[in-house]
Image (tube, rainbow, N blue to C red):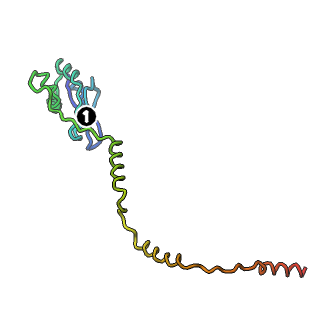
Amino acid sequence: MAVKIRLKRLGKIRVPQYRIVIVDSRKKRDGAVIEEIGLYRPKEEPSFIQVDSERAQYWLGVGAQPTPALEAILKVTGDWQKFKGLPGAEGTLRHAAPKPDKLELFNKALAEAHASAGSEAVTKKAKKDEKADKVEEPKAEEPKAEEPKAEETPAEEPKAAAEAEA
């Protein structure tokens, strides 16, 4: 049986993700596999490459043939040089910078907000609010004259007249 080391495609349209697999050469690209030995995501910057070096060395040693694309990946990780006995077995694999901690980012933004708390608001008041403030001020300054309370007798007079007639 001819065994190949090749890529098995996963992912959505325009977002490819691959698994590095050991497969019978007569099988389909995405068919049944013997073993999965790694991952490859070309759209990330830098490309994410993860290969189980021990298993790759084993399969290369027993005669599995890598495809040209996978041979290039193995050269980047250094597994191909290690198998052939060439210098540069450490590879040229680049790693992405670690993402900053979200709690640290929040605390930093909070500290910056407190430092600039003495400054005025970013947005200006609307002109409508300024006119309303000017109109309300004179009304607040004028004292209101107290009106005498009306006696409740006018409302009671019709009731009293109705009782007198009865």
Q: Which secondary structure, mark 1? A: strand
> Which one is in front, 81 or 35?
81
Query: In the picture provided, is 34 more to the left or to the right than 130?
Result: left
> Which one is in front, 139 or 1?
139
When asked about the image quadrant of residue 31, the answer is top left
**What is the x, y in percent for residue 48?**
23, 35
Residue extending farthest left? 87
When asked about the image quadrant of residue 60, the answer is top left
> Which one is in front, 45 or 134?
134
**What is the x, y in percent for residue 3?**
20, 22
How many numbered discs sit on the rendered protein? 1
- Which quadrant of the rendered structure holds the C terminus? bottom right
Residue at the image point whose x is 17% and y is 31% from the top: 73
Query: In the picture provided, is 132 more to the left or to the right than 159?
Result: left
Q: Is residue 119 above or below residue 21?
A: below
- Which quadrant of the rendered structure holds the N terminus? top left
Q: Amino acid at mark 1?
A: Tyr
Residue at the image point whose x is 37% and y is 67% from the top: 124
To which residue does mark 1 refer?
A: 18
**What is the x, y in percent for residue 128?**
43, 73
Residue at the image point whose x is 23% and y is 28% from the top: 51
**What is the x, y in percent for residue 91?**
14, 29
Residue at the image point whose x is 22% and y is 21% from the top: 54
When asked about the image quadrant of residue 163, the answer is bottom right
Residue extending farthest right? 166
